[in-house]
Image (spheres, rainbow, N blue to C red):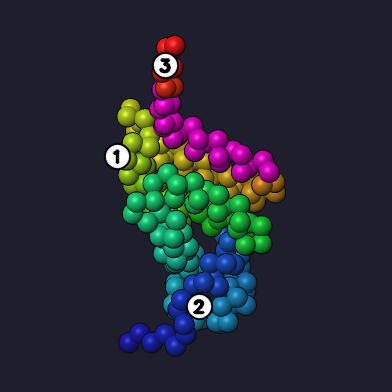
């Protein structure tokens, strides 16, 4: 018979998430996780089998709370290009100056293609972002905010690359004075410029 969990699982996953985010997968030991979660190693192994399984659960928690939370806040239905622009700008206001970075970005860089099962949550999170970008771009396309020939799917991948690149640069300490104009220029280039109003004809004398 399996034992009933007597701890707050959300609190445990949140603590594990922040630990992996700060230390990386390889740099996080079971002792670190014991200290962060307040659980003994036996309880951690019983609840999550091993460190890799706990990492997967922490990534799933990150996707559910951080990634989906950010998407829901900045990209509700109808947000269009303005919502996307605000979302990208919000990367410059990360807590602690973005010192610990994004768990998806950090894990993708650390684990790489050899990450195997541990990378499943990374792919899921990046997929959530890309789909949210595409949905907002599709709305912008229908609203005439993008060029008629624009492909929301292709632009979503381009923005995902920019999004992840910005997170790396933020963590690397690049100043907002460099990154903010980069974001603004990208969205200025995406938007269709309104047609200039014709000048009124001058009355002949």
- Image: 194 above or below 54: above
Q: In which quadrant of the rendered view does residue 151 lie?
A: top left
**Pointer 1: residues within 10 angstroms few (<14), some, or many (20+)?**
few
Q: Earlier in the sequence, mark 3 or mark 2?
A: 2
Q: CA distance from mark 1 to mark 3?
A: 39 Å
Q: In which quadrant of the rendered view does residue 200 lie?
A: top left
> Which residue does the image show at 61% across and 39% down from the upper left?
181
- Local secondary structure at mark 2: helix
Q: In which quadrant of the rendered view does residue 144 lie?
A: top left
Residue denoted by label 1 = 142
**Pointer 3: residues within 10 angstroms few (<14), some, or many (20+)?**
few
| Nearest to viewer (mark 1 / mark 2) | 1
Question: In the rendering, at what x and y percent does residue 8 appear?
Answer: 46, 82
- Local secondary structure at mark 1: helix
How many numbered dots are placed on residues in this image?
3
- Using the image, tell me which numbered label, if any, was put on residue 203: 3
- Image: 4 above or below 35: below
In front: 204, or 115?
Answer: 204
């Amino acid at each position: 018979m399996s034992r009933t969990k007597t701890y707050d699982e959300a609190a445990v996953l949140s603590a594990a998430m922040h630990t992996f985010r700060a230390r990386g997968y390889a740099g996080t030991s079971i002792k670190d996780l014991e200290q962060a979660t307040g659980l003994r190693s036996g309880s951690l192994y019983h609840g999550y089998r091993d460190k890799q399984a706990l990492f997967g659960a922490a990534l799933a928690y990150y996707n559910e709370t951080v990634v989906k939370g950010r998407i829901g806040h900045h990209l509700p239905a109808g947000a269009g290009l303005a919502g996307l622009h605000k979302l990208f700008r919000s990367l410059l206001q990360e807590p602690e100056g973005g010192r610990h970075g994004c768990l998806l970005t950090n894990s993708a860089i650390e684990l790489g293609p050899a990450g195997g099962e541990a990378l499943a949550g990374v792919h899921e999170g990046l997929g959530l972002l890309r789909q949210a970008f595409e949905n907002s771009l599709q709305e912008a396309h229908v609203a005439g905010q993008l060029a008629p020939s624009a492909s929301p799917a292709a632009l979503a991948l381009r923005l995902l690359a920019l999004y992840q690149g910005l997170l790396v640069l933020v963590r690397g300490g690049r100043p907002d004075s460099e990154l903010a104009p980069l974001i603004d220029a990208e969205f200025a280039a995406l938007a269709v410029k309104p047609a200039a109003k014709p000048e009124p004809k001058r009355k002949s004398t």
